[in-house]
Image (cartoon, rainbow, N blue to C red):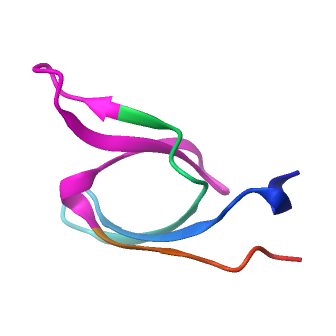
Amino acid sequence: MIQELPHYKLRYVNAKGKEKEYEISRPFDVVKNNEGNNVGFVAYSYGRGIRSFRHDRVLDMQPTEIPA
């Protein structure tokens, strides 16, 4: 089942300013601030579970080949 889901490679800067790479599913929910503005997304991070990511911290997001 997991092999059938789209995968993306995400380069991201966390709140402490450290750059990290994640392999994630297609985003499936949005993150909103107190004013209701869309500020991020939620995706499944393979090996790390469900995570939220802020748009302003995303450096790059590219589709990847699905492992066979």
Q: Give the vertical position of 34 relative to 49 (above or below).
A: above
Report how many numbered discs are placed on residues in the image.
0
Q: Is residue 31 visible in the rendered structure shown here? A: yes
User: Where in the figure is residue 19, as x and y percent of width and height?
Assistant: 30, 72
Q: Is residue 52 left or right of residue 28?
A: left
Left or right? Give the position of 36 relative to 65: left
| Residue 15 visible in rendering | no
Q: Residue at x 38, y 43 (%)?
A: 41
Q: Residue at x 53, y 39 (%)?
A: 28
Dominant SS type (magenta): strand
Above or below, comparing residue 16 to residue 62 in the picture: above
Viewer-nearest residue: 7 or 52: 7
The residue located at (32%, 33%) in the rendering is: 31
The percent coordinates of residue 22 (x first, y second) are 51, 66
Above or below: residue 3 compared with residue 54: below
Q: Residue 25 occupies which quadrant of the picture?
A: bottom right
Q: Name, please, the residue furthest toward the left.
A: 35
Question: Would you say residue 17 sits in the magenta stretch?
Answer: no
Magenta residues span 31-58
The quarter of the image holding the C terminus is bottom right
User: Which x, y percent locates residue 11?
Assistant: 38, 72
Q: In which image quadrant can residue 38 be found? A: top left
- Please state if 28 lies on the left or on the right of 6 as rendered: left
